[in-house]
Image (tube, rainbow, N blue to C red):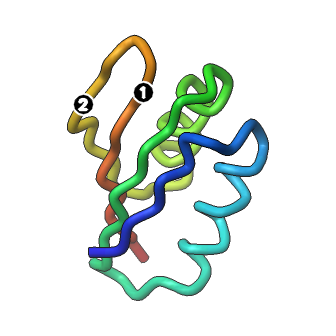
Amino acid sequence: MDRLDASALRCPLPLLRVKLWLKAARTGQQLWLRLSDPGSRQDLPGYLERAGQGVEVVADHPDRLELIITKHP
Protein backbone atom coordinates (compact mmCIF):
# COMPACT_ATOMS: atom_id res chain seq x y z
CA MET A 1 0.00 0.00 0.00
CA ASP A 2 1.27 3.43 -0.93
CA ARG A 3 1.23 6.23 1.64
CA LEU A 4 0.73 9.97 1.25
CA ASP A 5 0.79 12.25 4.27
CA ALA A 6 -0.70 15.41 2.79
CA SER A 7 -1.37 16.98 6.18
CA ALA A 8 1.09 19.79 5.49
CA LEU A 9 -0.42 20.56 2.07
CA ARG A 10 -3.22 23.03 1.40
CA CYS A 11 -5.99 22.79 -1.17
CA PRO A 12 -5.69 22.09 -4.10
CA LEU A 13 -2.33 20.32 -3.70
CA PRO A 14 -3.70 17.16 -2.01
CA LEU A 15 -6.21 16.72 -4.85
CA LEU A 16 -3.50 17.17 -7.47
CA ARG A 17 -1.26 14.61 -5.74
CA VAL A 18 -4.14 12.10 -5.55
CA LYS A 19 -4.97 12.65 -9.24
CA LEU A 20 -1.33 11.95 -10.16
CA TRP A 21 -1.37 8.80 -8.03
CA LEU A 22 -4.61 7.61 -9.67
CA LYS A 23 -3.12 8.14 -13.12
CA ALA A 24 -0.06 6.01 -12.28
CA ALA A 25 -1.75 3.36 -10.08
CA ARG A 26 -2.89 -0.06 -11.22
CA THR A 27 -6.44 -1.30 -10.65
CA GLY A 28 -6.72 -2.60 -7.08
CA GLN A 29 -3.74 -0.62 -5.82
CA GLN A 30 -4.35 1.26 -2.55
CA LEU A 31 -3.24 4.57 -1.11
CA TRP A 32 -3.35 5.56 2.56
CA LEU A 33 -3.94 9.31 2.69
CA ARG A 34 -3.85 11.77 5.60
CA LEU A 35 -5.43 15.22 5.19
CA SER A 36 -5.70 18.19 7.53
CA ASP A 37 -6.74 21.06 5.25
CA PRO A 38 -10.48 21.71 5.80
CA GLY A 39 -11.20 22.22 2.09
CA SER A 40 -9.44 19.00 1.11
CA ARG A 41 -11.11 17.06 3.91
CA GLN A 42 -14.48 18.12 2.56
CA ASP A 43 -13.82 17.90 -1.19
CA LEU A 44 -11.57 14.89 -1.71
CA PRO A 45 -13.87 12.06 -0.54
CA GLY A 46 -16.69 13.40 -2.72
CA TYR A 47 -14.39 13.75 -5.72
CA LEU A 48 -13.20 10.15 -5.31
CA GLU A 49 -16.75 8.82 -5.08
CA ARG A 50 -17.85 10.79 -8.17
CA ALA A 51 -14.78 9.48 -10.02
CA GLY A 52 -15.80 5.89 -9.22
CA GLN A 53 -12.85 5.19 -6.94
CA GLY A 54 -13.03 3.26 -3.69
CA VAL A 55 -12.74 5.39 -0.57
CA GLU A 56 -12.88 4.29 3.05
CA VAL A 57 -12.59 6.61 6.03
CA VAL A 58 -10.28 4.99 8.59
CA ALA A 59 -10.00 7.94 11.01
CA ASP A 60 -11.94 11.18 11.27
CA HIS A 61 -10.56 13.51 13.93
CA PRO A 62 -11.10 17.25 14.31
CA ASP A 63 -7.57 17.95 13.04
CA ARG A 64 -7.14 15.20 10.42
CA LEU A 65 -8.86 12.75 8.11
CA GLU A 66 -7.31 9.44 7.09
CA LEU A 67 -8.55 7.56 4.03
CA ILE A 68 -7.78 4.37 2.16
CA ILE A 69 -8.27 4.88 -1.57
CA THR A 70 -8.62 1.87 -3.85
CA LYS A 71 -8.00 2.43 -7.57
CA HIS A 72 -10.90 1.20 -9.70
CA PRO A 73 -10.85 0.93 -13.51
Task: Tell me where residue 63 appears, x and y as whole percent.
Answer: 44, 18
Q: What residue does disc 2 label?
A: 59
Which residue is located at x 47 percent, y 53 percent?
Answer: 5
Task: Tell me where residue 35 appears, x and y as whole percent.
Answer: 50, 38
Numbered badge on residue 64 = 1
Task: Tell me where residue 47 appears, x and y as whole percent.
Answer: 58, 42
Labels 1 and 2: the sequence-earlier one:
2
Q: Residue furthest right?
A: 12
Numbered badge on residue 44 = none
Q: Nearer the viewer, residue 31 or 34?
A: 34
Q: Please indicate whether residue 61 sits to the left or right of residue 12 in the image.
A: left
Which residue is located at x 61 percent, y 79 percent?
Answer: 23
Q: How many marks?
A: 2
Task: Tell me where residue 57 appears, x and y as whole percent.
Answer: 27, 36
Find residue 32 and report its image quarter: bottom left
Q: Please indicate whether residue 26 sits to the left or right of residue 39 in the image.
A: left
Which residue is located at x 65 percent, y 49 percent?
Answer: 14
Q: Nearer the viewer, residue 5 or 45?
A: 5
